Image (spheres, coloured by chain):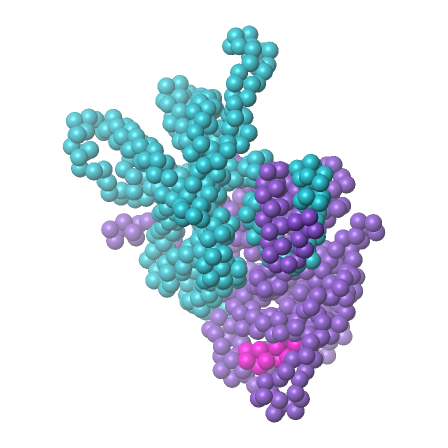
Chain colours: A purple, B cyan
Amino acid sequence: QEVYLEERLRELDLRSDSDVPDVPPPTDSTPEILKRALSGLSARWKNWWIRGILTLAMISGFFLIIYLGSFMLMLLVLSIQVKCYHEIITIGYRVYHSYDLPWFRSLSWYFLLCVNYFFYGETVADYFATFVQRREQLQFLIRYHRFISFALYLTGFCMFVLSLVKKHYRLQFYMFAWTHVTLLITVTQSHLVIQNLFEGMIWFLVPISSVICNDITAYIFGFFFGRTPLIKLSPKKTWEGFIGGFFSTVVFGFVFSYFLAQHQYFVCPEEYNSETNRFVTECEPSELFQMKKYSLPPLLQAVLGWEAVNMYPFQMHSIALSTFASLIGPFGGFFASGFKRAFKIKDFADTIPGHGGIMDRFDCQYLMATFVHVYITSFIRGPNPSKLLKQLLVLQPEQQLNVYKTLKSHLLEKGILQPSLRG
Amino acid sequence: NLQESESENKLDGETASDSESKSEFGGSPPVPTSDDTPEVLNRALSNLSSRWKNWWVRGILTLAMITFFFIIIYLGPMVLMTIVMCVQIKCFHEIITIGYNVYHSYDLPWFRTLSWYFLLCVNYFFYGETVTDYFFTLVQREEPLRILSKYHRFISFALYLTGFCMFVLSLVKKHYRLQFYMFGWTHVTLLIVVTQSHLIIHNLFEGMIWFIVPISCVICNDIMAYMFGFFFGRTPLIKLSPKKTWEGFIGGFFATVLFGLLLSYVMSGYRCFTCPVEFNNDTNSFTVDCEPSELFQLQEYNIPLVLQSVVGWKTVRMYPFQIHSIALSTFASLIGPFGGFFASGFKRAFKIKDFANTIPGHGGIMDRFDCQYLMATFVNVYIASFIRGPNPSKLIQQFLTLRPDQQLHIFNTLKAHLVDKGLLGSPEDA
């Protein structure tokens, strides 16, 4: 049995690692202008400055897009998703690159298209219900949406099966799985980000900012006070940075939410106005965003000297979001670090000078997006009323009558509906 | 320097060429399959040559499985659900074992535990969603169930996250790539095995006929294609499976469509097959009793002129469901086999003859179910798109979580709609 095992392992080439090509050293994509400006400094400080400048550039870009509105934000999220997907697929392609795998790239992009089509149809269609109602072709697409998406996916699946080449089976299956796991990670979560966005820009801004803040403050605390290493995977992280970052992020989230909660632009759910053909963010702010008086527990009363404080309820939620961003978000970063070490790459790509690829910046965001979405659906928002109404109107008449009777008895019981005069 | 410190060179080298000279099983030593055939069969067939013996073993086991299938159908939906769950767990176990064997000589910490944990999490999530939808009133009565169901997604996500963090903490310096591969392997397996077994259960709840007809069509196509291929097979179909032929493929297609029509005709007559499965609160059991929907009521169809001259009838009485069964059988015969080719490719890629040795003569459970998976998803998408509307009790449940003003708004709109359609009397009587 031992001999057999040895033979099999040798057969499957599990002993040699000769085929994984070393990644060529990243080309320096720093723009010329920056290079000239910083030519006087030593390499270490130069790197620090480049990172700093690019960080500011990214944050400014972020503010600019927020100002431009939710539609631009959606486009931005979509572009980031496509870029992340591209980066991961390129890594996979490079790892197995010297083989002429037919169709791999086309199929990967095709699957990306299919999955995006499916998700956009499911989520966006709900929000554009009035827009869709007016056009016949769109109605057909919406009604049979799942079937169409499934048919598109199946076509890709059959193409994959037909493209299997005798000598490359295992590689092709690996790449198929790689594509699917990447889709699962990047595409589903980018759609969760967009759904959070539709709930209200604040649900998009606060989580992302908390993760970025945690990144920066953990780095700063680690730089000044860092002694104890946190985890073998990322030797630069320290416990001091971790804990310092946690407290700073909670405070930051708290303060930031206070400012954002005051503006309707950030707080209101996105709605599509069919008359003006634009997104509008105007509404009665929900109770989450109305100031309330909270009595401080006696402990804090003694410390701060106040008896009560005016806060938005949302700020309590922001504490939960910041806590997650600081405590669990980093695991996304560790996962990406492990992934990079596993495949012997320093960065996902060279898109951003000094920072690496887009994936490098967004690795902690993914868990955050899913958490915020689950949080919203569990604790904040109920189901979407217009979607519910739409489904009710599709039922069989008999079922509609039954539902009507159940609803009526419920509403009468709760006193929401007054019994009619005739009884 | 990252590249120097990693001494995981020994561990895994995925080469493109699967040892080129050994593309057929003959070249490489196959996994020694222990002969599972029960002693009694061995003795009964000891006289025949090994080829016929194999044929007989397969035949007998086929009949045994089909009989077993009928027994379970007789026992009812609860048992069926349990069986689907067991099949799912066994398939998951088989695929994970293959992955484990491929990377076996390395002492990967936590791999098996984490795989089973993720299986548990995903199943908990799906069963929770299903139970909440279909057992709504039961859930509302019991306090702990109500809380579990209200925060279900959050709890499932927290459970999954725990597993994710455990995985990250379990990464060992020399085994990173292997561990990531196993993580990916586990997730893809979960995606394939677990989601589709739950789609099967959803189909089952729609009515047992939606469970039985698709599965039978796939099995029938398997058997018919084999028979047609055995007797008439000349032209090979695809390089992946050299035993399949075009004659078998086309013959199997027509035979399956015919079989589907006949089976649907027989089954549509019985309520226990056509009615959706419901949970009765008073008796605390499943009931399958209802007014058959129009799909299952005989209708007269005019035969197109072409067929009239052939068949000699002007009209025929059929159930509308039989038309749908044609779509199901067509899918089972034309696209279902791609699932089988996928599994064949997978077995060749990882140099295994069968997924496991659970069923003598047939291999593992996965070998029998590889074509079923695409079918289950198709039936579910088909039902959602063409047959069923939304689930009323789920809608009521969602309604009850809305705010009062939203509830009132929806109630009034619904009322206006019903009055409009004439289903309700005058508004005052409503």
Asked if residue B350 lies left or right of residue A215, the reply is: left
Looking at the image, residue B265 lies above or below residue B91: above
B359 or B28, which is in the foreground?
B359
A47 or A274, which is in the foreground?
A274
Asked if residue A111 lies left or right of residue B211, the reply is: right
| Residue at image coords 44%, 56% | B124
A288 inside magenta stretch: no
- Tell me where residue B236 appears, x and y as whole percent: 44, 25
| Residue at image coords 47%, 33% | B274
First to last magenta residue range? A241-254
Task: State whether residue A247 appears in this view.
Answer: yes
What secondary structure predominates along the stretch shown in magenta?
helix
Task: State whether residue A197 appears in this view.
Answer: no
B185 or B59, which is in the foreground?
B59
- Tell me where residue A18 appears, x and y as whole percent: 45, 55
- Tell me where residue B29 appears, x and y as whole percent: 30, 42
- Specify the farthest residue to the front: A422
Numbered-mark total: 0
Looking at the image, residue B294 lies above or below residue A55: above
Image quadrant in which you'd find residue B171 = bottom left
| Residue at image coords 73%, 58% | A270
Image quadrant in which you'd find residue B73 = top left
| Residue at image coords 43%, 48% | B282
Quarter of the image that includes the C terminus of chain B = top right
A245 inside magenta stretch: yes
- Tell me where residue A282 appears, x and y as whole percent: 78, 61
- Specify the farthest residue to the right: A276
